[in-house]
Every structure is written in structure tokens, then in C-alpha cells.
Amino acid sequence: MELKYKQAIQNNNLSVGELPEDAQTGIDNINDVLRALNMLEKKGKKPTAKTLRKLKAMDKWVHYEILDYLHDTDKNVDEIPHDSDEIVDDIKDDIKTDTTTTNDDEKKPVELDDHTKLGLKIEEGFSKMISEKSEWDIEEIRKNNKPAYDLLFDTYEEDEENGITTSNYSLIEQEDLSYTLKTT
């Protein structure tokens, strides 16, 4: 999906950092939704038309914020049209409840096991952490992603390579209790 706000940034030689706070927040919200959509697609599922319409509306709103910034106007007075947390929760629900057709053509939800649920929690934490920075010490991990911290603590071995790798991220120890977070 091509996003209008990205075109506006590129066409006007802008950086996200110079945009007004509302536009930056809107971009963060769009990125949260895009990360969730990426997880959905990795599970072999497609987003619903409703989710894509909501994402398009958010993109349009951010695009108008950028136009207001460029033209020194304030015509985009409404709030962002959709809450990214609600959209992400809907997408996560789509990921968690897979429907399988039985011989009776009945659909029944398939529950995720505890390891998969833990992995999704850790990955959700990583997606927030990576937007802040890539270098993390163990105490920062504990404060920002408790499930990842607990897993590191439970599996830590002295003088061994320690870390966590998920479908989208890797958090690998570089020095004693200092980690680098990267997208995979």
C-alpha cells in the first residue's frame, strides 16, 4: 500500500522530525498498524477491507497535517480518525483466532499455545522499543519489555551468546548485559 504522507514527505524534501507533533504522532500510529499488519501477513492472512479503509483514513489525515504545515494553515482541525490501538487489537484478534474448516464446514477457533502468546507479547514490546533506540541495557529491557527480560533472565548462560530472536526482531547481547535490538 502506497501511503500519501510518505509521498508528501519525499516530494517536499521533509524529514519526519521537522513535522508538527500531530503529524509525527499520526505517523507513529500508522507504523503501529503497519507492524501489526506485517505480523498478520506472516501468519498467511490478509487484512480486512475495513482495516485497510481505517489505515487509509489515518494516512489521509497525516497527509493533510503535512499540507497544513507546508502551507502554514490549520484546516485539518479534526482528530486522527481512528485509534491505532483499537486497530492493532483487532488485527491481533485476527492473528489469535484462526478459523479452520471441519468436515461439517463448521468453523472453530484455534487457540494459540503459551509459547506463541509469549512470543507475540515479546515482539509487541520490541516493536515499541525499536522506535526509541537500538542499544539497551538489561534494566531498560526490564522496564520496557518485562516478558523479554524474564526470558533473558531464565535462559541466561555466562560466557555464552545470549539473546532473543523473533520473526521480526533480534535482541542479542553485545557486552555483559548490554543488548542490541535489530529488525530481522
Image (cartoon, rainbow, N blue to C red):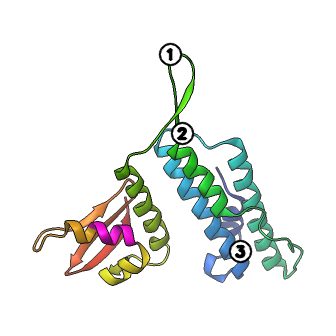
Most common SS among magenta residues: helix
The mark closer to the camera, 1 or 3, is 1
Q: Secondary structure at mark 1?
A: loop
Specify whether 80 is left or right of 137: right
Question: Can you give x and y, in whole percent of width and height, for residue 184 in the image?
Answer: 37, 58
Query: Tag 1: residue type?
Result: Asn
Q: Which mark is residue 23?
A: 3
Q: Does the CB distance between marks 3 and 2 fall below 8 Å?
A: no
Q: Are marks 1 and 3 in contact (CB under 8 Å)?
A: no
* Cα gap from disc 1 to disc 3, whole angstroms: 50 Å
* Residue under the point 23% across and 67% down: 154
Which residue is the site of mark 2?
A: 45
First in sequence: mark 1 vs mark 2: 2
Q: How far is mark 3 from mark 2, CA to CA?
A: 30 Å
Crowd band around label 1 with a 10 angstrom C-alpha radius: few (<14), some (14–19), many (20+): few
Image position, residue 8 (x, y; %): 72, 66
Of circles 3 and 2, the one toward us is 2
Amino acid type of the residue tagged 3 in the rendering: Ala
Q: How far across and down, in percent of the image, does residue 83 sit?
A: 70, 64
Distance in Å between CA atoms under marks 1 and 2: 22 Å
- Which sits in the foreground, 103 or 3? 103
The residue wearing badge 1 is 103
Magenta stretch in the rendered image: 146-151
Please check the rendered image and state whether residue 147 is part of the magenta-colored stretch, yes or no: yes
Residue 184 or residue 152, whichever sits in front: 152
